Amino acid sequence: MANYVVAVTGASGAIYAVRLLQVLLSAGESVHLCISNSGVQVLGTELGLMVDLRRFSIRQLFPQIPEETVEAPAELALYGGFRPLPNPMRLDRLKYHRFDDFSAGIASGSFLTRGMVICPCSMGTLASLAGGHSENLIQRAADVHLKERRKLIVVPRETPISSIQLDNMRRLAEAGAVVLPAMPGYYHGAQTIPDLVDFVVARIADQLGVEHRLMKRWGAPAEPA
């Protein structure tokens, strides 16, 4: 079990974040979650999820999970069309931090983690990171991961991309971050939107070193029927 930080900001692609949380919690990892105000708006617009940052509950992201459940059965934890995960989601492994709470452990380099993902990552957040800002907990935690030389993955979802945004991505990459745009591939036999989502989440999990079976890998033999 390892500590991972997941931050959700105000770019399109909230479903990537929800699916990533499913995968990490199903793998039994400890997840420290932080959501920005704009991230709340996107979760509501794209997924119809009403998230209250002051009174947050994991069931605001997974409303189909019963209140008394600690280990969510895979079939209850999934949105329509996604393949079942191998293990129940360990809801007790998730720790939520308000985006303005600088007393959280993830604001310090002395708090050990195995990596951080900002998914999706807005262009505003990207620019703040490239400029070295620490105006909220998401930015501070990302800055900590860079200075401590730990894995930081940013998942931007924007098109087209301006030269300013490209330069911000370059600066982050040079500082040690992994820039992983939400650009799904099709070579794994994608047939549904969940297949495309899982492609991106699989690449994030690979970067974090988390095992999964979300997609068929290129060159891998076909699974037995």
Image (cartoon, rainbow, N blue to C red):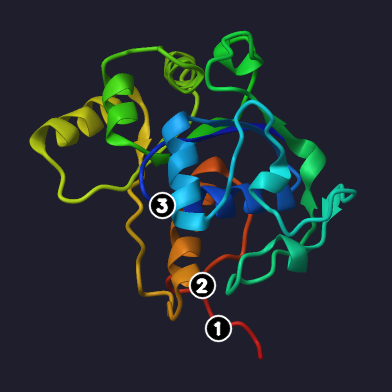
Furthest-left residue in this view: 163
State which tag comes first along the sequence, 2 or 1.
Answer: 2
Q: Is residue 155 above or below residue 182?
A: above
Q: Nearer the viewer, residue 217 or 60?
A: 60
Tag 3: amino acid: Gly
**On-image quarter of the N terminus:** top right
Mark 2 burial class by Cα count in 10 Å: few <14, some 14-19, many 20+: some
**On-image quarter of the C terminus:** bottom right
Tag 2: amino acid: Lys
Q: Is residue 133 left or right of residue 205?
A: left
Q: CA distance from mark 2 to mark 1?
A: 8 Å
Q: Nearer the viewer, residue 97 or 27?
A: 97
Helix, strand or loop for disc 2: loop
Q: In which quadrant of the rendered view does residue 130 lie?
A: top left
Mark 3 burial class by Cα count in 10 Å: few <14, some 14-19, many 20+: many
Q: CA distance from mark 1 to mark 3?
A: 30 Å
Q: Which mark is residue 13?
A: 3
Residue drawn at point x = 50 percent, y = 24 percent: 150
Whether pointer 2 and pointer 1 mark residues with C-beta atoms closer than 8 Å, the reply is yes
Q: Nearer the viewer, residue 46 or 182?
A: 46
Residue 21 on image: x %, y %:
62, 47
Q: CA distance from mark 3 to mark 2?
A: 22 Å
Q: Is residue 139 above or below residue 2?
A: above
Residue drawn at point x = 27 percent, y = 34 percent: 123
Residue 217 seen by the camera: no
Q: Which mark is residue 222?
A: 1
Q: Which residue is mark 2?
A: 216
Helix, strand or loop for disc 3: loop
Whether pointer 1 and pointer 3 mark residues with C-beta atoms closer than 8 Å, the reply is no
